[in-house]
């Protein structure tokens, strides 16, 4: 979608659960009563280095006489000093052994050791006294239990539901079951049924269960069952029959500190119909996770969480995926689409196009991973650009995109299948190079990227609005407008109701500009918070207020800087135009550029309703 690079995922204080229950005895008999967890915490980060701490806790009934923690770091991450343990390494594999005074750990007690390190990596492959730290089958003398059966729901009322499931199995016996509501444990029971009460009327919930054996090891989480309580007064958001979709970026939770909860506090969640979660990677001809920490591992505190409850280290799903699950529980009319590719990762589509069916299968498997299968309602493909050039150039041919979308539709069935597409309406431009009309029967809609037509990559100008609705005298390139793009798609044979108009929640700007009107010369890109030549609307509306409008969008000249961006007023005009053209709705890039009260989302909602 945008931008030219992914934002740096700088570490905040984080908790990485690498823990499980591990037998620590010298004999199979003792392994029944001795178990422990190992948990890593990043205690500080000063840019060039960080502080880390491991905590070993005895969760068994017998004392531990010694302990060894092992883990792997990426090649760019190292331990530079340590205390309360002897830490050594062989390449990227690190080993910490207790010192003389802290080897013995009584039942229920714990010990910690710390270290300083360099590099951005996180530990992986944790082992505790030779056993897997995630409670896997390598636990000496005791395997974890199997997954219970997917629960069934009965007796649903306004405030309660009865859940039942088939038993798990274990080589030494199942002790009890954790009942998970929306990924968080709400009860631990010995029976294979549980009645959950105190629920909210007219609300969606997701339930699963997880078995725990006599050594307190947990097995895999079962499949999930969706439950909608009766009653309530849930009202669908005012959609006006149009799509109102926004992009949520995985990296926005870092420097931008924009979390899923901000969609609630800004009021935006009540005014949209869809969210595109960006981005999944495309590599080796397959769909892949983009940022595992942000996607499903980051622990959100209570004040950051949609539900108001803090994530725990041992819950099955955390990160943005779990936050989206919580958002959908509050706003069941919102559909979430997993978007793959983007500017940075579109180079992977060349391999994907060689075997569309295999690519579609890989994407389906990832989107429907049992850990988050209830989160996503479909897939979005952001290929920049098929049979043309973006960050990289593609020569897959004009039919490659059509073949890919056909394979995705065949695999995803009635789920949403969408795509972000070029807005290059120039003669012989990117729209002309791909069979978008041939692919349109397989997609629910196209997100036409009607922004970034002009910007400070042309360092000396001429200054021009980056998202013109129509042409104007002096426009630097014919065909680089929203109207031209939509006209070309429709002429090619794409139905108007499958085209969404795109709005950028940011501006593009130059510096060294003396002329107020568009068409002036410049000396380079204006300074931006995260990237030269680009700035969020929420900043620009105050730092460089609008001084004029042209071609349906706004521009601002302040000092020597010149910016163009959309405002609530220009968005209202664009929404009116979109309705007059019979378009299917609007989308925007991306939520974090809006004000804290979501005024741009409000303008889209009002304009399309």
Image (cartoon, rainbow, N blue to C red):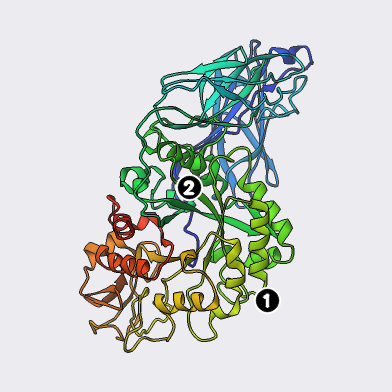
Is 138 situated above or below 421? above
Does residue 353 appear left or right of residue 278 in this picture?
right
Q: Can you identify the residue that label 2 sits on?
A: 335
- Say which element carries label 2: strand
Note whether residue 191 is visible: yes
The residue closer to the viewer here, 88 or 19, is 19
Residue in the picture at 58% in, 72% down? 437
Does residue 88 appear left or right of residue 156 in this picture?
right
Q: Can you identify the residue that label 1 sits on?
A: 397
Outermost residue on the bottom side: it is 474
Is 495 situated above or below 172? below
The residue closer to the viewer here, 106 or 174, is 174
* Residue 518 image point, x, y percent: 29, 83
Please give the count of numbered marks on the rendered protein: 2
* Residue 555 image point, x, y percent: 27, 74
The residue closer to the viewer here, 71 or 190, is 190
* Residue 560 image point, x, y percent: 25, 78
State the CA–CA distance, disc 2 to disc 1. 32 Å
């Amino acid at each position: 979608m945008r931008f030219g690079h992914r934002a740096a995922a700088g570490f905040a204080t984080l908790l990485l659960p690498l823990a499980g229950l591990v037998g620590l005895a010298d004999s199979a008999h003792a392994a029944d009563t001795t178990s422990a967890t190992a948990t890593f915490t990043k205690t500080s980060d000063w840019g060039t280095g960080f502080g880390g701490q491991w905590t070993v806790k005895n969760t068994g009934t017998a004392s531990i006489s010694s302990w060894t923690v092992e883990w792997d770091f990426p090649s760019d991450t190292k331990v530079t000093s340590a205390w309360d343990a002897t830490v050594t390494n062989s390449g990227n594999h690190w080993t910490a052994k207790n010192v003389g005074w802290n080897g013995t750990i009584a039942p229920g007690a714990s010990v910690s050791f710390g270290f300083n390190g360099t590099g951005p990596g996180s530990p992986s492959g944790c082992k505790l006294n030779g056993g897997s730290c995630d409670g896997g089958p390598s636990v000496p003398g005791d395997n974890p239990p199997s997954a219970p059966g997917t629960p069934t729901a009965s007796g649903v009322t306004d405030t309660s539901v009865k859940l039942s499931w088939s038993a798990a199995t274990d080589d030494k016996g199942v002790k009890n079951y954790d009942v998970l509501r929306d990924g968080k444990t709400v009860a631990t029971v010995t029976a294979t049924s549980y009645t959950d009460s105190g629920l909210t009327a007219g609300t969606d919930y997701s339930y699963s269960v997880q078995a725990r054996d006599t050594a307190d090891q947990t097995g895999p989480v079962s499949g999930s069952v969706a439950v909608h309580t009766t009653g309530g007064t849930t009202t669908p958001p005012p959609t006006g029959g149009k799509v109102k979709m926004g992009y949520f970026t995985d990296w926005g939770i870092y420097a931008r500190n924009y979390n899923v909860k901000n969609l609630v506090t800004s009021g935006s969640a009540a005014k949209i119909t869809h969210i595109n979660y960006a981005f999944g990677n495309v590599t080796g001809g397959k769909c892949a996770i983009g940022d595992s920490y942000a996607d499903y591992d980051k622990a959100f505190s209570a004040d950051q969480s949609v539900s108001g409850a803090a994530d725990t280290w041992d819950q099955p799903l955390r990160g943005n995926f779990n936050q989206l699950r919580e958002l959908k529980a509050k706003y069941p009319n919102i559909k979430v689409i997993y978007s793959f590719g983007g500017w940075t990762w579109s180079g992977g589509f060349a391999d994907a196009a060689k075997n569309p069916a295999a690519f579609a299968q890989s994407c389906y498997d990832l989107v429907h991973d049992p850990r988050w299968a209830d989160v996503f309602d479909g897939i979005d493909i952001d290929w920049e650009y098929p049979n043309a050039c973006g960050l990289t150039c593609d020569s897959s041919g004009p039919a490659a995109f059509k073949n890919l979308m056909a394979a995705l539709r065949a695999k995803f069935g009635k789920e949403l299948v969408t795509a972000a597409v070029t807005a290059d309406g120039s003669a012989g431009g990117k729209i002309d190079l791909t069979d978008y009309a041939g692919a349109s029967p397989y997609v629910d809609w196209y997100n036409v990227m009607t922004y970034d037509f002009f910007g400070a990559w042309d360092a000396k100008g001429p200054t021009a609005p980056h998202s013109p609705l129509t042409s104007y005298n002096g426009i630097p390139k014919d065909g680089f407008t929203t109207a031209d793009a939509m006209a070309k798609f429709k002429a090619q044979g794409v139905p108007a109701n499958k085209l969404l108009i795109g709005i950028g929640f940011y501006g593009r700007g130059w510096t060294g500009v003396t002329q107020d009107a568009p068409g002036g010369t410049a000396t380079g890109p204006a300074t931006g918070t995260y990237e030269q030549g680009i700035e969020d609307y929420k900043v620009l509306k105050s730092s460089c207020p609008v001084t004029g409008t042209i071609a349906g969008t706004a521009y601002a000249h302040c000092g020597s800087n010149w910016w163009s961006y959309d405002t609530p007023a220009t968005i209202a005009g664009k929404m009116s135009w979109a309705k007059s053209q019979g378009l299917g709705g609007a989308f925007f890039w991306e939520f974090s550029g809006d004000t804290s009260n979501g005024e741009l989302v409000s303008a889209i909602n009002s304009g399309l309703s």
